[in-house]
Image: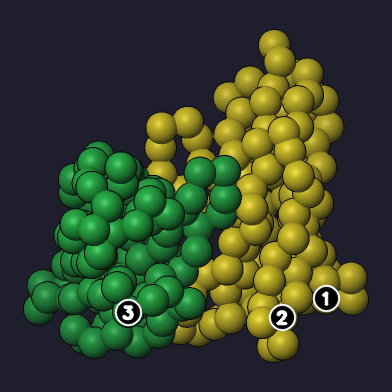
Amino acid sequence: GDSVTQMEGPVTLSEEAFLTINCTYTATGYPSLFWYVQYPGEGLQLLLKATKADDKGSNKGFEATYRKETTSFHLEKGSVQVSDSAVYFCALSEGQSSASKIIFGSGTRLSIRP
Amino acid sequence: DAGVTQSPTHLIKTRGQQVTLRCSPKSGHDTVSWYQQALGQGPQFIFQYYEEEERQRGNFPDRFSGHQFPNYSSELNVNALLLGDSALYLCASSLVDSYEQYFGPGTRLTVT
């Protein structure tokens, strides 16, 4: 079945460092891809999304590009802040135009040092 | 505009008991999905409800059941609780024709 594999954490960086969190997926169709973020004590929030190959999702300085040829959706940010400390989940949805189950990776905990 | 709300926030139950968790979707949403998130893991899809019927189901035993009401709110019921059912249970709402799901804060269930 469909699955998502993301880089294991925890990841610890200094403020203003460059961030990459790797994510690859396995899917039989053409999934939509997501990054969700879970801040301490809060629920899951959608960070960014991409629905077709070569789409770039972006939000709050984070970016990820849907790469069909490498089945990847790596999350990047040029300069991280302490407030970016959270758990990040890569995910896919089988549907593009209808509500469908979301399949999540295991999460990557990110800690940013001042 | 209220987002997705869940109750209760925390719950402690004994092995073998039954539990009911509740979810109110974001205003205007008609579809509710439930997920189980074990400690240190990503959420796992349990099932999805639309028009008061189960629309999709993940790989969970029949001990997990649900219901959706005419006002689109939903309940998750778990019977014969096991220690392994201890987890954060997340509710997500959406429109049936949209892939975007909005998550609630979750209910933390502890089974002792």
Q: Looking at the picture, how far across and down is residue B17, in whole percent?
A: 19, 57
Q: Looking at the picture, how far across and down is residue A83, in whole percent?
A: 58, 24
Q: Looking at the picture, how far across and down is residue A66, in whole percent?
A: 77, 67
The residue singled out by tag 2 in the image is: A27
Residue type at mark 3 is: Asp
Q: Looking at the picture, how far across and down is residue A69, in whole percent?
A: 89, 76
Q: Provide the secondary structure element on which disc 3 rests.
A: loop
Callout 2 touching callout 3 (CB < 8 Å): no
* Residue at point 58%, 34% (across, down): A86
When asked about the image quadrant of residue A88, the answer is top right
**Which numbered dot is residue B62?**
3
* Residue at point 66%, 82% (across, down): A1
* Residue at point 50%, 35% (across, down): A39
Q: Is residue A62 left or right of residue B75?
A: right
Share a chain, discs 1 and 3? Answer: no
Residue type at mark 1 is: Lys
The chain in green:
B
Mark in the foreground, 2 or 3: 3
Q: CA distance from mark 2 to mark 3?
A: 27 Å
Q: CA distance from mark 1 to mark 3?
A: 36 Å
Q: Is residue B54 above or below residue A49?
A: below
Q: How is the image coloured?
A: by chain
**Which numbered dot is residue A68?**
1
Chain letter for mark 3: B
- Look at chain A in the picture and name its colour: yellow
When asked about the image quadrant of residue A68, the answer is bottom right
